[in-house]
Amino acid sequence: AFCQAGAKLKVNIACLHHGEEPVISGTGGSGTIFFSHCNLRCVFCQNYQISSMGWGEEISIQSCAELMLSLQEQGAHNINLVTPTHFTPQIKQALILAKKEGLTLPILWNSNAYEKVETLKELAGLIDIYLPDLKYAHSVYSKKYSKASDYPQVAKFALKEMFFQAGNLHINDNGIAQKGLLIRHLVLPNALAGSRDLLLWIKDELGTQVYISLMAQYYPAHQAIGIPELARGITQEEYDKVLDYAQQLGFANVFYQELSCSSEWTPEFCEERKDAENYT
């Protein structure tokens, strides 16, 4: 169908990832599993080799559980499931199996927020941390750039369910997140993401104590280089305006980045799966 995924799980990289927020990566790294395919078609996707081109290797549910256990043995702070939504039934089975076999780490659902409330309810009790990337405030842009005109409405309902399940982010004495919601938002050039409107919605619906991560790492990847309004990175002024507005609204917990218009934050994907022991 639209996501182009088959019935079997497909994974590109399983690694100890140090490029997440400090409360996720810590010192030991986040035990990250990058799943292939996606239920959006973002023209600027920085992971397009796996999301659109489908690079990766099909694995069994048992193998997925073993990947999680291997990452735990290597010292990961959590198990970080990246772009998992279209494999929800299979991942649910893998999580149940891995927990039976000794998985005790917090489980992190790292998604694009384009998922049904019914899907998220299936995960209740299995997911500790929700890390959604809230992309757009306005449907005209979500349709134009991600082929999902209903994205804003769907994502907002999803975030409410995530917050209901997990609450505000809880961080232990070592500075590592254990449970809760952390909302990511990638600032786009020319205010195309509607960042101010999204921040206002978060304040009104979820409060100012919710943790947010305002990302400055946009660069024109995939098809964006040929789209004039997306064909450049964001400016410091554009990013600062979003940060300033978050401060004006009273958000107490905001992660921010140094401006970067390069691929330094993007993993090096390969056409076949690469596991942590072979990943640098």
Image (spheres, rainbow, N blue to C red):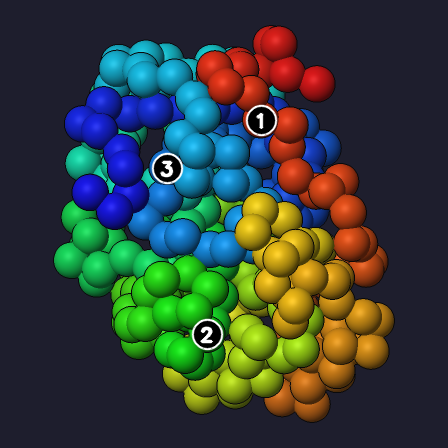
Element type at marker 3? Answer: loop
Residue at x 68% of width, y 34% of height? 18
**Position above or below: 204 against 93:** below
Label 1 crowd bin: few (<14), some (14–19), many (20+), radius 10 Å: some
Spatial CA distance of label 3 from label 2 is: 21 Å
Q: Secondary structure at mark 2?
A: helix
First in residue order: circle 1 vs circle 3: 3
In the picture shown, does residue 76 fall above or below 70? below
x, y percentage for residue 205?
40, 83
Q: Position of residue 110 (x, y in %)?
A: 45, 46
- Quick check: can you spot residue 182? no
Pointer 2: what residue?
A: 141
Counting the numbered discs, the total is 3
| Residue 269, disc | 1
Residue at the image point whose x is 80% and y is 54% from the top: 260
* Most foreground residue, 72 or 232: 232
Q: Which of the 4 image quarters holds residue 81?
A: top left
Q: Position of residue 57 (x, y in %)?
A: 38, 17
Crowding around mark 3 (Cα neighbors within 10 Å: few <14, some 14 to 19, many 20+) is many
Q: Residue, x 37% and y 37% (percent of image)?
A: 37
- Disc marking residue 37: 3
Estimate the spatial distance between the alpha carbons at disc 1 and disc 3, rounded to whole Å: 13 Å
If the image is split into quadrants, where does the C terminus sit?
top right
Label 3–label 2 contact, CB within 8 A = no
